[in-house]
Amino acid sequence: MTWRSSRVEVEDSHEAIQAYFRARRWSDGLPIVAPTEVRVAAMLAGAADDPGRVIGRVPPTWHDLTVEKLAINAVMAGCEPAYLPVLVAAFEALLDPAFNLHAIQATTHPAAPLLIVNGPIVREIDLNCGSGVFGPGWPANATIGRAVRLVLMNVGGAWPGEGDMATQGQPGKYSYCIAEHEALSPWEPLHVERGFARDQSVVTVIAGEGPHNVNDHVSEAAGPLLAVVAHTMAALGSNAKWVLEDSSYVVVLGPEHAATIARDGFTRADVQRFLYETARLPLRELQLGGMWRMHDWPRWMRAVTDVDARLPIVPSPDAILLLVAGGPGKHSAVVPNFSVGRAVSRRIGSATS
Amino acid sequence: MAAAVICTTAFEGMARRAAEALGMGTLPLVVIGHPLGGLRAEEVEARVREAAERLAALVAGPLPDRP
């Protein structure tokens, strides 16, 4: 194999390898797996792709991301070769101009790319879509999300305080990858909603804050339960709503909450419409602070003078990305987006090599 | 046409690295005090004066070293 990356010689010990990589900032702070030629070659075998193909340029350094560089970082993160096609598709989505990765890398906001995986690959590579879906324990979720971060740092230069100006950041910047629990969803899965076939595997990326918990142990009907979801969404401190055109939310309903809502006959569109109409804030609260006077709203919203008028936080019902994930229990989550950039979906395994 | 990026001190390093990454290492930066958000009106006016003086210097000739 003809390598495009340079070869380095490092003493063959765990301590020496970690020290070498940390000294060059080729790390997220956790120990890495040494990307030896054998391991990188094995990783590349996981995707039918040209190692020299440039997937795109990663801001803010704008270095080329080749499939080979992606495979090196996937090894470092601890990925299995079967995960590589997910990463290829994820970076094709992340580097789509509509996603606006440069702003997301550089912003003071804590946004991190959230990967949502749908389709047969979820089972094939054992991605967690059940209990603790946002948490630890599952190699595919943990290492795919970590590989994304390593590329953003090692290729894109998103070092904290330098290329990544997040004031505080968030734990999702280590790893942020979930899958939808399609078998427990009462509705069509997210990727079908976004125009793909059910039997296709798809990754959707969105720049998200950390998940905000929705705890509702008492609601027995769709209306009151969705009211709690809406209340959690309508948070004054979140970015979403201030730049309305690109504001979006991921609503991850736990399976029990989804079942309660579906029992009342609610379709996916009903849920999105309910949340669009009720997850709102009165003008008088929006005027308290946040990004008031820095906001970018459509003309009709700027003309509102009634301080009791309840204004939307997303531009349309379909700006609410609805999916089902999680295990037993009465919890859901909402993830507000960065609001300068949009969710992008790419089919997994369709790379043009 | 003279052009410059205005940024606060906290973002100067990032701005310089971004300019260099795009092959514009000599791009002038007008660096003003940080922060810019959350200031009272008179403090904002001071920032404006600070930026205006440096922008005027840029238009008039070579950019002096930042203060």
Image (cartoon, coloured by chain):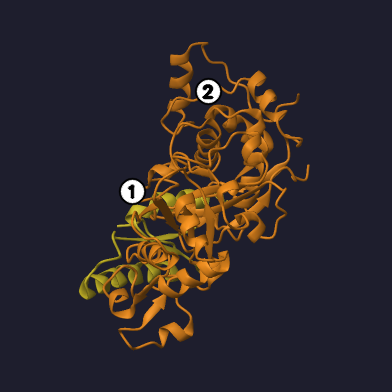
Q: Secondary structure at mark 2?
A: loop
Q: Nearer the viewer, residue A294 or A263?
A: A263
CA distance for labels 1 and 2: 27 Å
- Return the residue at label 2: A33
Note whether residue A332 is visible: yes
Callout 1 crowding tier (Cα within 10 Å): few <14, some 14–19, many ≥20: few
* Subunit ID for the residue under disc 1: A
Q: Is residue A316 left or right of residue A351?
A: left
Q: Secondary structure at mark 1?
A: loop
Mark 1 / mark 2, whichever is N-terminal: 2
| Relative image position of residue A131 (x, y in whole percent) | 46, 40
- Return the residue at label 1: A168
Q: How many marks?
A: 2
Note whether residue A62 is visible: no
Give the residue displayed 43% in from the left and 20% down from the top: A19
Query: Which chain appears yellow?
Result: B
| Relative image position of residue A82 (x, y in whole percent) | 66, 31
**Identity of the amino acid at label 1?**
Gln
Callout 2 crowding tier (Cα within 10 Å): few <14, some 14–19, many ≥20: some
Give the residue displayed 75% in from the left and 46% down from the top: A350
Residue B55, relative to residue A263: is it above or below?
A: below
| Quarter of the image where one finds residue A89 | top right
Query: Which chain appears orange?
Result: A
Q: Is residue A313 left or right of residue A147?
A: left
Give the residue displayed 50% in from the left and 35% down from the top: A142
Q: Quadrant of the C terminus of chain B?
A: bottom left
